[in-house]
Image: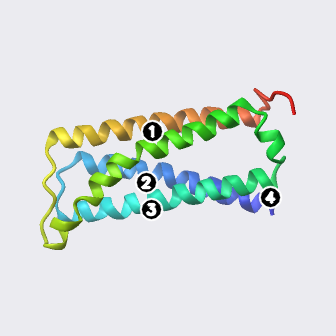
């Protein structure tokens, strides 16, 4: 069962990264109605994948791996959890922007997004990607047992 949850955890993590990369590419181009719809769907998948990643990760911590006591005595794990939270918070402004396009899109119009606004969205996405890179560093440190204290 542990191997299955490890696989699901990795699958969700790759889905999160893939969705973020796709969003980054889509926001760079001119946003027509179809592109905006794609971006909305990918953002929804990003949110769902992130939720699954957190849920599966917590199940692994509490039920399928070394136990919560081990993980909560590891600074890379704690940093990874905080970084995940930070990435989640950074994803809120782009998601709210993308959701704000629903009304014009229902009327069959592409959202009007200025180049300045797209740069603003890309900045958030860059920060999210940087957070994910740091999460990967923490995961590698955890896998090697670095940073375990007490417990």
Residue 2, labelled with which disc?
Answer: 4
Say which quarter of the image contains residue 35. Answer: bottom left
> Which of disc 2 and disc 4 is earlier in sequence?
4
The CA distance from mark 3 to mark 1 is 16 Å
Q: Secondary structure at mark 2?
A: helix
Describe residue 121's horizontal placement relative to residue 115 as left or right: right
Assess disc 4: are there few (<14), some (14-19) or many (≥20) residues with their C-alpha within 10 Å of its C-alpha. Answer: few
Residue under label 1: 129
Looking at the image, is mark 2 or mark 1 earlier in the sequence? 2
Which callout, 4 or 1, points at the residue further toward the start of the chain? 4
Q: CA distance from mark 4 to mark 1?
A: 28 Å
* Quarter residue 28 falls in: top left
In the image, which disc is placed on residue 45? 3
Question: In the rendered view of the protein, which quadrant contains the N terminus?
Answer: bottom right
Q: Is residue 83 left or right of residue 139?
A: left
What kind of element bears circle 4? helix
The percent coordinates of residue 10 (x first, y second) are 63, 53
Q: Regarding mark 3 in the picture, which secondary structure is present there?
A: helix
Q: Residue at x 36, y 64 (%)?
A: 41
Label 4 – label 2 distance at C-alpha: 26 Å
Residue hosting label 2: 19
Q: Quadrant of the C terminus?
A: top right
* Label 3 vs 1, first from the N-terminus: 3
Q: Most extreme residue toward the right, as rendered? A: 151
First in sequence: mark 2 vs mark 3? 2
- The residue at 46%/33% (across/down) is 130
Vertical comparison of 27 with 127: above or below: below
Q: Earlier in the sequence, mark 3 or mark 4?
A: 4
């Amino acid at each position: 069962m542990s191997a299955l949850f490890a696989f699901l955890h990795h699958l969700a993590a790759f889905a999160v990264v893939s969705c973020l990369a796709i969003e980054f590419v889509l926001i760079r181009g001119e946003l027509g109605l179809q592109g905006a719809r794609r971006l909305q769907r990918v953002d929804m998948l990003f949110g769902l994948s992130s939720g699954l990643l957190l849920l599966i990760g917590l199940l692994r911590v509490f039920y399928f791996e070394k136990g919560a006591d081990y993980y909560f005595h590891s600074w890379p794990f704690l940093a990874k959890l905080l970084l995940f939270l930070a990435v989640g918070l950074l994803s809120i402004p782009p998601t709210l922007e993308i959701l704000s396009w629903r009304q014009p899109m229902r009327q069959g119009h592409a959202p009007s997004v200025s180049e300045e606004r797209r740069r603003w969205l890309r900045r958030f996405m860059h920060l999210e990607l940087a957070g994910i890179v740091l999460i990967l560093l923490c995961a590698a440190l955890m896998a090697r047992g670095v940073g375990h204290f007490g417990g």
